[in-house]
Amino acid sequence: MAYSNPTIDRILEHRTIREFTEEKVPEEMLAAFLEVINRTASSTGMQAFSVIRATDPKVRRDIAQVCGQEYVARAPELFIFIVDAHRNARIAQEQGSEAKARRGMDRFFQGCMDAVLAAQNLTTAVESAGLGAVFLGSILNDAEAIVRILKLPELTFPVLGVGFGRPNQDPMKKPRMPIALKLFENEYQDRDAWLPAIAEYDKEMETYYDLRERGKRSDSFSGQVARYLDNLQAKRAKMLRVARAQGFDLGLDD
Ligand SMILES: Cc1cc2nc3c(=O)[nH]c(=O)nc-3n(C[C@H](O)[C@H](O)[C@H](O)COP(=O)(O)O)c2cc1C
């Protein structure tokens, strides 16, 4: 690679970490991570997200149960990023505004994007400090349960969890398909020519050992995709109903 710098070098070393030592994350590091979360770009500057730091063992266990992943409860730090359109609705109402747009679908997506970007920024900062992190999309296995566990009020919605701490494992870097397959110029092109490249990538993926699979070699990427797309997850398929129950108007009615 022709160009690099320490930030790029660190990002290119990214690996998801799922097992941590019991060491606590030092307070001063945590404070810096919170600043990073807070400094993240935010759609229209509305900062329509919040973070819930799960410290209560019972709350952590309940979240881990929703995730179906026991290592979630063991992560030294567990942050849940949520859409928070609740705070701004209250701020607007304090101003005497009717806040007519407070429930809009746009508020929902804006909050999702803010939350996801803040979570990635946190993860980048965590990795730069020599720690490791895991994203937890599995909190959405049961969004309704997470709403209950975290006592989320109207106009909030869980988006993504991040568990982090000092790594207690040394996983391989997971191969990626070539960026050329994901990069287009000016317009999308459905390319049959990608098949040989995917076949190459499949072979590379088969050399990857996923620590979650107890030392078994990984399936090919194509095999993983096929299995994944065969798997309808009933509760996840209905998660926008939970968003609606949280007060968002999804804009689907005439
Ligand atoms: C939005 C998102 C949600 C994820 N959710 C989970 C999760 O619930 N549990 C988990 O163990 N890993 C989760 N991951 C981690 C991915 O499995 C991981 O990034 C992917 O397999 C690539 O591996 P790598 O990060 O080690 O390169 C998630 C990643 C992303 C981006």
Image: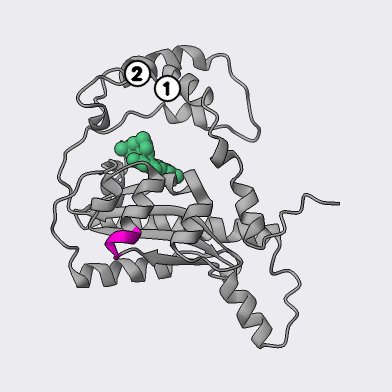
Judge whether 89 appears above or below 184 on screen.
below
Q: Position of residue 226 (x, y in %)?
A: 49, 19
Residue type at mark 2: give it: Asp
In space, the residues marked 2 and 1 are separated at their CA atoms by 6 Å
Q: In which quarter of the image is ligand 1?
A: top left
At 69% from the left edge and 69% from the top edge, which residue is drawn?
102
Q: What element carries label 2?
A: loop
Q: Foreground residue, 140 or 109?
A: 140
Residue 234 x, y percent position in the rendering: 56, 35
**Residues shaded magenta:** 55-59
Q: Where is residue 122 in the image (x, y as percent from the top left)?
A: 35, 59
Q: Mark 2 points at which residue?
A: 219
Residue at position x 28%, y 44% in the image:
70
Q: In which quarter of the image is the N terminus?
A: top left
Q: Which of marks 2 and 1 is nearer the N terminus?
A: 2
Q: Which mark is residue 224?
A: 1
Is 57 magenta? The answer is yes
Q: Where is residue 131 shown, x and y percent of the image?
A: 21, 53
User: Horizontal placement of 78 versus 243: left or right?
Assistant: left
Mark yes or no: residue 162 visible: no
Q: Do the residues labelled 2 and 1 touch (CB within 8 Å)?
A: yes
